[in-house]
Image: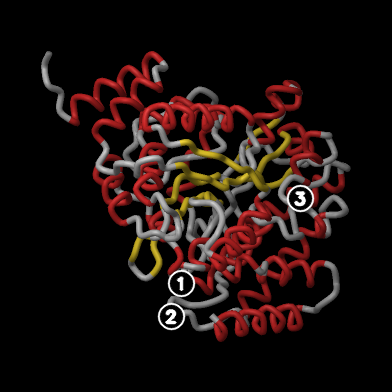
Amino acid sequence: MPVLDRRSLLAGAAATGLAGGDLLGFARAWAQSTEWKPEPGASLSLLRWKRFVPSEDEAFMKMVDAFTKATGVKVTVTNESFDDIQPKASVAANTGQGPDMVWGLFSFPALFPDKCLPLEDVADALAKKYGPWFPSAQAYGKVKGKWIAIPVAFNGGYPNYRISAMKKAGFDKFPTDTAGFLELCRGLKKNNTPAGFALGHATGDGNTWCHWALWSHGANLVDANEKIVINSPETAKALEYVKSLYETFVPGTVSWNDSSNNKAFLAGDLYLTNNGISIYAAAKKDNPKLAEDMDHAVWPIGPAGKPTEFQLAFPILAFKYSKAPNACKAFISFMMEAANYNPWLEAAQGYLCEPLSNYPKNPIWTSDPKNAVFAEAGRRSLAAGGLAPVSERIAAVLADFVIVDMFASHCTGREDVKGAIKNAERAATRIFRNT
């Protein structure tokens, strides 16, 4: 019997896995060759965000099952809403008890970097095979130059719109600048086919579009040295612009969470919003006529003169308190292998996209022209700090909804421009002073 080396084992199994669906065959070959050998008798618990696309969850759990059968490591997966991940992870970090791994949103690992298992070896190995990492992905994985998490994927949160409503509002194509975007929203309201964007504590939808609005006007919360610079003419212009948008919105957006706009769009009460591809995926399954009338676009360019997108990142971390650190590294490495990753990505129907630049091309991006824009999220996104590196402070700004609350307070009339900026400045000063 010939002796197979690591490369031939994996190459053959990957080809079989991708072509024939033999995930377990790949997993067994991978388990023989991986440099991270799970501890004897190891078991793992994983806390992850609750899926928005059922087929993604099904594919992910098949991956988990294959890992368990190939390594003997049982993995228990618990799902929580976007908004509940960070608080539960913080409790686990502070008490030293809870899940071995947490797969969450944005920069949450930076809230407790000293509690995270170093993952430099995993990050480097993935970069050698599929890299380089996109700059925004690397920003989420590193704190102070050290890898504390692996940015598994991005979720492209782009404008989702009804084609017929856009055309009725006088636009043949989706506007590419912020001025045209406002005029579209005004036209939609006039025709009783309104837009709506979350101004409540929606971890994904609210944070992403509000940061886009801020950055698109050339404003930032902090500069590259973490000096607070939110009190600026550019921020004032961003506030006035968003208030003008808010006047066109469907009622209730100040209380929306991350599922509110999905429900409103699918119910026919909303005609333009920001979201991942999950609305479109649900419509294709349950309401094909609505899906036929849907499309997606990149975010318009504002006075800043360049793309200022803020896309949702999904980093995974392992805690130092885990009794099975090698098993954690093995699992994270396994889920990122192309033979697993690409079929899982395809099952996500475009809801997730790659954080590394040289994965094999995935058919999900070309199988439907309406999916194509979502493939760009990792490349186009800025990281959470804008001008500044991701840090514990930046993570706290997101967790506390500083930017979202600034816009919401002005849109609802609770604060004028100066008051809204002053409150955001005060909140940022408290965070940057105390962390």
Left or right, 14 with respect to 64, comes to left
Task: Verify CB contact (< 8 Å) between mark 1 and mark 2.
Answer: yes
**Residue in the picture at 46% in, 30% down:** 63
**Residue 178 % position (x, y):** 64, 57
N-terminal-most mark, 1 or 3: 3
Residue 401 occupies which quadrant of the picture? bottom right
**Residue in the picture at 85% in, 75% down:** 414
Give above or below for 118 relative to 409: above
**Residue 39 % position (x, y):** 34, 44
Q: Amino acid at mark 3?
A: Cys
Instruction: Give the structural element (helix, strand or loop) at label 2.
Output: loop
Disc sitting over residue 388 in the figure: 1
Kindly report the distance in space between the C-alpha atoms of the residues bearing marks 1 and 3. Answer: 32 Å
Disc sitting over residue 225 in the figure: 2
Residue 57 occupies which quadrant of the picture? top right
Instruction: Give the structural element (helix, strand or loop) at label 1.
Output: loop
Quadrant in the picture for the N terminus: top left
N-terminal-most mark, 1 or 2: 2
**Residue in the picture at 27% in, 51% down:** 124
Disc sitting over residue 185 in the figure: 3
Of residue 382 and residue 431, the one placed in the foreground of this image is 431
Kindly report the distance in space between the C-alpha atoms of the residues bearing marks 3 and 2. Answer: 36 Å
Q: Amino acid at mark 2?
A: Asn
**Residue 405 % position (x, y):** 73, 69
Left or right, 256 with respect to 205, comes to right
Give above or below for 287 relative to 104: above
Of residue 121 and residue 376, the one placed in the foreground of this image is 121
Q: Amino acid at mark 1?
A: Ala
Left or right, 99 with respect to 205, comes to left
Task: Verify CB contact (< 8 Å) between mark 1 and mark 3.
Answer: no
N-terminal-most mark, 3 or 2: 3
